[in-house]
Amino acid sequence: MEYEDIAQNARDLSYREKLKLAQLLLQLAMKEEEEQNPDERKLAAAGSGDPGDNIEYVAPRLLKLRPGKKEGVLNSIAAMYQFQGGISDADKERIFTGLVKHGYIRLESNNRVSYPGGDV
């Protein structure tokens, strides 16, 4: 199938189907790019892989989002890595623990999260 055939068929889709197709194409292209340049992609996305670098990658983004509960923090961390192939639950917990240890966030009762630094 050629590009023009695909483009013509895409014109016949509903707007939701077009959005889903666009998302799929972006994911496929990003995956292909990552396979062709794996080292550059990983370094650009999250530092060298050192957990300290991951904390430095996550902290400023998290402070902008400011989720109110631990589950929200974990979901936010997952979202930051969704286009790099995802992140394991264990790695999310490690980053969460590192954020607490470095004072970016504080875990309160009922899994509530506070931000000791005040407003950003």
Image (cartoon, rainbow, N blue to C red):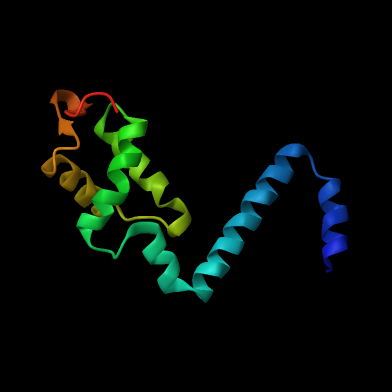
Q: Is residue 46 above or below residue 20?
A: below
Q: Is residue 70 above or below residue 34?
A: above
Q: Is residue 17 above or below residue 87?
A: above
Indicate the quadrant containing the N terminus: top left, top right, bottom left or bottom right.
bottom right
Q: How many marks?
A: 0
Answer whether residue 75 is visible to the viewer in this image: no
Of residue 13 and residue 54, the one placed in the foreground of this image is 54
Of residue 55 and residue 118, the one placed in the foreground of this image is 118
Q: Residue at x 23, y 62 (%)?
A: 50
| 97 to the left or right of 14 | left
Q: Position of residue 99 (x, y in %)?
A: 19, 43
Q: Is residue 62 above or below residue 10?
A: above
Answer whether residue 58 is visible to the viewer in this image: yes
| Quarter of the view holding residue 72 | top left
| Quarter of the view holding residue 74 | top left
Of residue 49 and residue 44, the one placed in the foreground of this image is 44
Q: Position of residue 14 (x, y in %)?
A: 78, 39
| 114 to the left or right of 37 | left
Q: Residue at x 44, y 66 (%)?
A: 41
Q: Position of residue 101 (x, y in %)?
A: 11, 43
Q: Residue at x 57, y 69 (%)?
A: 32
| 103 to the left or right of 50 | left
Taking the view exactly as shown, the residue that stands out farthest to the bottom is 36
Q: Residue at x 32, y 29 (%)?
A: 67
Indicate the quadrant containing the C terminus: top left, top right, bottom left or bottom right.
top left
Q: Position of residue 3 (x, y in %)?
A: 82, 64
